[in-house]
């Protein structure tokens, strides 16, 4: 039997510990280790090598867009993964999943539809070099 090599993961740049709860939509770049909870959408910045690693007690209630995802926690919302998605034993996904490459371990639960997308359909909403302009600062009179 032939086995493919697993995707190499980048370094973890951000840690959200088990006691941390984030409320609101969040975007990140690089590697993110989530052991806490996020109530809102989670989106990776395009072409940042965005990896999401979710611990067993982690939870996201909102949609998730990542390049690489290793999921051991719970996601209540749709998941879009543009490279590689791994659902570990005990992971729970309550939503639809779009993926390029997926690995589902025994014991993972998916309550939704699975749909494969190609790398050419990659459309993340944020770019690395996007500049934000603040209009109407509160100090303006």
Image (tube, grey):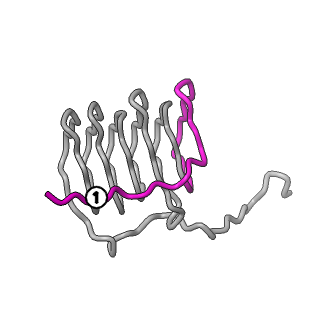
The correct choice, above or below, for 90 with respect to 40 in the image is above
Query: The C terminus lies in which quarter of the figure?
Result: bottom right
Label 1 element class? strand
Side of 139 relative to 101 (left or right): right
| Residue at the spot of label 1 | 99
The correct choice, above or below, for 94 with respect to 4 in the image is above
Residue farthest toward the front in the current orientation of the protein:
1
Does the magenta stretch mainly form a helix, a strand or a loop?
loop
Residue ID at (54%, 63%)? 48
Q: Quick one: label 1, few (<14), some, or many (20+) residues within 10 Å?
A: many
Residue farthest toward the top in the current orientation of the protein:
19
Residue ID at (46%, 41%)? 40
**In terms of image quadrants, where is residue 20?**
top right
In this view, the residue in front, 19 or 88, is 88
In this view, the residue in front, 104 or 45, is 104
Q: Where residue 34 sits: x, y (%)?
A: 49, 37
**In terms of image quadrants, where is residue 120?**
bottom left
The correct choice, above or below, for 28 with respect to 100 in the image is above
Residue ID at (38%, 58%)? 7
| Residue 67 sits inside the magenta stretch | no
Q: Where residue 74 sits: x, y (%)?
A: 34, 34
> Which segment is the magenta one?
1-30
Residue ID at (37%, 69%)? 122
Query: The N terminus lies in which quarter of the figure?
Result: bottom left
Side of 30 relative to 88 (left or right): right
Residue farthest toward the left in the current orientation of the protein:
1
In this view, the residue in front, 4 or 67, is 4
| Residue 4 sits inside the magenta stretch | yes
Q: Where residue 95 sits: x, y (%)?
A: 26, 43
Q: Where residue 129 sits: x, y (%)?
A: 63, 70
């Amino acid at each position: 039997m032939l086995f493919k090599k697993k995707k190499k993961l980048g370094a973890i740049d951000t840690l959200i510990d088990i006691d941390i709860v984030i409320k609101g939509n969040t975007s990140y770049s690089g590697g993110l280790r989530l052991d806490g909870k996020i109530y809102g959408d989670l989106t990776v910045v395009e072409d940042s090598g965005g990896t999401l690693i979710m611990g067993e007690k982690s939870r996201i209630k909102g949609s998730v867009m990542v390049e690489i995802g290793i999921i051991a926690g719970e996601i209540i919302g749709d998941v879009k993964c543009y490279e590689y998605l791994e659902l570990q034993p005990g992971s729970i996904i309550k939503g639809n999943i779009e993926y390029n490459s997926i690995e589902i371990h025994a014991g993972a639960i998916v309550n939704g539809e699975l749909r494969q997308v190609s790398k050419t359909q990659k459309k993340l909403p944020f770019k690395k070099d996007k500049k934000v302009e603040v209009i109407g600062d509160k100090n303006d009179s």
